[in-house]
Image (tube, rainbow, N blue to C red):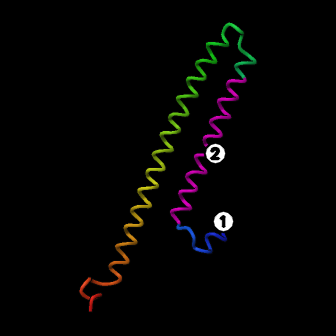
């Protein structure tokens, strides 16, 4: 990562966007592990009569948790995209201001 950064191939925002993806990847894995452990504990400890209803409820809960995760991730990605666009616009404005007004460039 340091070599890419030293070469100047990516901006600070690109690194932050990669951090967002990494953080959400870890969260998704943890969420999956959490529900897998709960499902396995239910399979081992619940009586056969209760097992099906509890597993169904856990699977529904897991589905809702993953949907909420997907919405959070989409919101974070949209926010990161908006920040990148705002930074790019700011850089364009700075470049235009550094060159001076259009009349000065023509002469």
> Which range of residues does the magenta coloring cover?
12-40
- Mark 2 is surrounded, within 10 Å at the Cα level, by few (under 14), some (14 to 19) or many (20 or more) other residues, namely few
Tell me the number on the disc at residue 26. 2
- Mark 1 is surrounded, within 10 Å at the Cα level, by few (under 14), some (14 to 19) or many (20 or more) other residues, namely few
Residue ranking furthest to the left: 103
Is 23 situated left or right of 90 in this image?
right
Q: Quadrant of the C terminus?
A: bottom left
**CB-based contact (under 8 Å), mark 1 and mark 2:** no
Q: Residue at x 37, y 69 (%)?
A: 90
Q: What residue did someone put label 1 on?
A: 1
Q: Earlier in the sequence, mark 1 or mark 2?
A: 1
- Label 2: state its secondary structure: helix
Q: Is residue 101 above or below residue 73?
A: below
Q: Nearer the viewer, mark 1 or mark 2?
A: 1
Measured as percent of width and height from the top left, residue 40 is found at 72, 24
Spatial distance from mark 1 to mark 2, Cα to Cα?
A: 19 Å
Q: Is residue 68 above or below residue 9?
A: above
Is 78 situated left or right of 26 in this image?
left
- Label 1: state its secondary structure: loop
Magenta segment: does it hold 29?
Answer: yes
């Amino acid at each position: 990562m340091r070599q890419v950064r030293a070469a100047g191939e990516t901006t600070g925002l690109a690194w932050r966007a990669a951090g967002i993806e990494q953080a959400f990847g870890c969260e998704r894995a943890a969420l999956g592990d959490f529900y897998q452990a709960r499902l396995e504990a239910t399979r081992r400890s619940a009586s056969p009569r209760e097992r099906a209803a509890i597993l169904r409820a856990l699977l529904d809960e897991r589905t809702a948790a993953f949907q909420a995760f997907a919405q959070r991730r989409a919101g974070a990605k949209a926010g990161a995209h908006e920040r990148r666009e705002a930074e790019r616009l700011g850089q364009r404005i700075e470049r235009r201001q550094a060159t001076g007004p259009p009349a000065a460039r023509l002469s």
